[in-house]
Image (cartoon, rainbow, N blue to C red):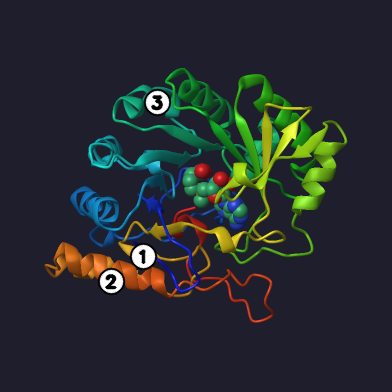
Amino acid sequence: MLADSYGRVATDLRVSLTDRCNLRCTYCMPPEGLDWLPKPELLTDDEINRLIRIGVTMLGIDEIRFTGGEPLLRRGLVGILAEATALSPRPKTALTTNGIGLSRTAAQLAEAGLDRVNVSLDSLRPDVFEQLARRRRLDDVLEGMAGAADAGLTPVKVNTVLMRDINDVEAPDLLRYCLEHGYQLRFIEQMPLDAQHGWRRDTMITADEILDRLSAEFDLRAADDEERGSAPAELFYVDGGPETVGVIGSVTRPFCGACDRVRLTADGQIRNCLFAREESDLRSLLREGGTDEEIAKRWRAAVATKLPGHGINDPSFLQPARPMSAIGG
Ligand code: SAM
C-alpha cells in the first residue's frame, strides 16, 4: 500500500505522458511555451509500462489518469493504455485532455481499454477561447468531446477554469451546454501553478462566486458527502437532478484530508502532491537496474512523507518549481 503518516492511502495514479502542449492557456503557460524536457529525460513507453505495473500489482493503485502537458501528443499512448488495461487487477483508466484531435482517436483509445475522458473547456465563444488558450481551436475541442461520447468514453467530464472578466460570465452557459450534451461539468478554482507566477488570490474566482453565478439561473442542492468520496469535486444536483455540477475549490475549500492521489511526471519523478516541493527519482533507479521491489520501496517512501495539506493558505507558501504542465494536471 502507498500509505502516508496521516492515514491516507494513495490508490489513484496521475501519469504525465509529456510536458508539451498544443495550447497556451494563460493560467498555465506563457505565450512562447516552455523549455520542454529533453527526450533522454523522458520515460520511454516501456519504462512507463513497468512503473504502472509496479503501482498496480505491488502498491494498490486501482485507478490511472493519463495527463500532461497534452497526453494525446504522446505517440505511444494507445500501447501504454493497452498494457495498463491488460494488468490484473485491471485498473480504471481516464485521460485528461484538451480534446484537440480526440474526435479522430477516441474509438482507438476506447478499443485500447480507456474508460473515460475529462476534457478541458473554458469558453463556448471562439474569441474568448482564443484569448484564454491563445489558439483558435474551439471547434476542435467541441468535436473532440462529441467524438469521445460517441466512442463510449463516458461519462465525459468537462473541466473549466474561470478567469475574472474573461470567461466568468459564461458559467451558466457552460453548464447549460454540458447538461444538453450529457457531459458532467466541473469548475476548478485557479491554482498558483502557472509558469509565469501570475496567480493572485484577490483576482481568482472562488468556489462561492462560482456557486453564486450558477444559482442565479439554476437551483443547486449539495449532494451527500458519500457521493463525493475522495473526489476533488463537491457535487451539486442541478434543478432537482439527477444531473450534477462539480466545484473543485482547491484553494478556498481544500480537500487534502481525503486525497488519494500520487503523481508520476513524464521524467519519472514521484510527487505526493501537486504542490510538493520535493520529488522522488524513480527514473534513475530504473536506469541503474533497480529491482521492482527497490522501486516499490522508494515509491512507498515518497508517499509516506506526504504533508497533511497543500499549504496554499499558509503565509509561508511557496509555489512549486515546476508548473502544472510539467507536473501533470
Ligand atoms: N492538456 C490537458 C488538458 O487540457 O486537460 C491535460 C493537462 S492540463 C494541465 C489539466 C487541467 O489542469 C486542465 O483542466 C487545466 O485547465 C487545468 N489547469 C492548468 N493550470 C491550472 C491552474 N493554474 N489552476 C487550475 N487548473 C489549471
The three-letter code of the residue at mark 1 reads Ile
- Residue 177 placed where, x, y %? 69, 25
Q: Secondary structure at mark 1?
A: strand
Q: Secondary structure at mark 3?
A: helix
Q: Which residue corresponds to mark 1?
A: 270
The one of 259 and 273 positioned closer to us in this rendering: 259
- Whether tag 2 and tag 1 are in contact, CB under 8 A, the answer is yes
Residue lying farthest to the bottom in this orientation: 316
Return the mark for residue 182. none
Q: Which residue corresponds to mark 2?
A: 298
Q: Residue at x 70, y 40 (%)?
A: 223
Q: CA distance from mark 2 to mark 1?
A: 9 Å
Q: Residue at x 32, y 68 (%)?
A: 300
- Residue 93 placed where, x, y %? 38, 39
Choose mark 2 or mark 3, whichever is in front. Answer: 2
Q: Which residue corresponds to mark 3?
A: 106
Locate residue 108: give its quadrant: top left
The three-letter code of the residue at mark 3 reads Ala
Marked residue nearer the N-terminal end (2 or 1): 1
- Mark 2, residues whose alpha carbon is within 10 Å: few (<14), some, or many (≥20)? some
